[in-house]
């Protein structure tokens, strides 16, 4: 399965790097994962029902949250076109000037290099760039390092939990 495609035919100038990748890392989950999720939903619902002396709102809430988790686990990532040049970053149809970011960090997960771009504004989500694992990936990191401060990434408890849940 091809994870990325570097496009050199559509470059706007010589210093621009274009590539296409999945918008996020999608992990394969086996039957055991889904059976475990259903078992967890049943167990937590029963426990919530028992602890609240027959209130049905707790089991309904738990089943709803598990259903949402199941729906997101089945969603397939779409392909995203990325472009990087001396002015900024293009992600799909959106353009971000380098001044928009305060720093970036990177990590490797399942043989995929992921760059996290942290936005200057509060309460804005982190933007992830999935990099190709070839020479273009090194060039992309060099361009980013020229314009944005690199900060080493600290793995949080939430990151570890999402990794365990295969998200």
Image: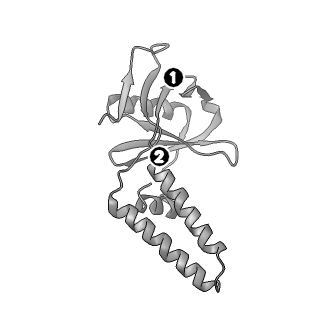
Q: Position of residue 135 (x, y in %)?
A: 33, 29
Residue 155 horizontal side relative to residue 119, left or right: left
Which quarter of the picture shows residue 9?
top left
Q: Residue furthest left?
A: 1
Res 153 visible: no
Spatial CA distance of label 1 from label 2 is 31 Å
Q: Nearer the viewer, residue 130 or 166?
A: 166
- Indicate left or right for 12 with 125 as reference: left
Residue 75 tag number: 2
Q: Is residue 22 visible?
A: yes
Q: Residues within 10 Å of mark 1 (few under 14, many from 20)?
A: many
Would you name the residue on which mark 1 appears? 85
Q: In the displayed structure, would residue 12 be above or below residue 74?
A: above
Q: How is the image coloured?
A: one colour
Q: In percent of the image, x 33 and y 36: which residue is there?
A: 133
53 vs 23, nearest the viewer: 53
Of the numbered discs 1 and 2, the one sitting upstream in the chain is 2
Q: How many marks?
A: 2
Residue 72: give x, y in percent of width and height: 50, 51
Crowd class of label 2 (few under 14; some 14 to 19; many from 20; radius 10 Å):
few
72 lies above or below 164: above
Helix, strand or loop at disc 1? loop
Residue 167: x percent and y percent?
A: 45, 54
Residue 49, x across and y down, in percent: 59, 80
Q: Residue placed at 32% from the left, 32% from the top?
A: 134
Query: Looking at the image, which residue is at 48% across and 13% down?
Result: 13
Seen at 29% across and 36% down, the residue is 1
Report the mark closest to the observer, 1 or 2: 2
Q: SS at mark 2?
A: loop
């Amino acid at each position: 399965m091809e994870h990325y495609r570097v496009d050199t035919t559509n470059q706007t100038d010589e210093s621009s790097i274009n590539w296409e990748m999945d918008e996020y890392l999608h992990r394969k989950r086996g039957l055991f994962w889904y059976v475990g999720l259903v078992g967890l939903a049943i167990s937590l619902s029963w426990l919530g029902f028992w602890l609240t002396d027959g209130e049905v709102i707790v089991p309904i809430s738990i089943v709803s949250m598990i259903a949402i988790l199941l729906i997101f686990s089945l969603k397939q990532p779409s392909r995203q076109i990325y472009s990087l040049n001396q002015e900024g970053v293009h992600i799909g149809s959106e353009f971000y000037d380098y001044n928009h970011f305060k720093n970036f960090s990177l990590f490797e997960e399942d043989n995929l290099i992921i760059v996290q771009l942290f936005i200057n504004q509060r309460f804005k989500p982190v933007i992830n760039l999935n990099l190709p694992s070839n020479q273009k990936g090194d060039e992309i990191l060099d361009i980013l390092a020229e314009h944005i401060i690199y900060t080493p990434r600290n793995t949080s408890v939430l990151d570890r939990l999402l990794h365990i849940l295969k998200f």
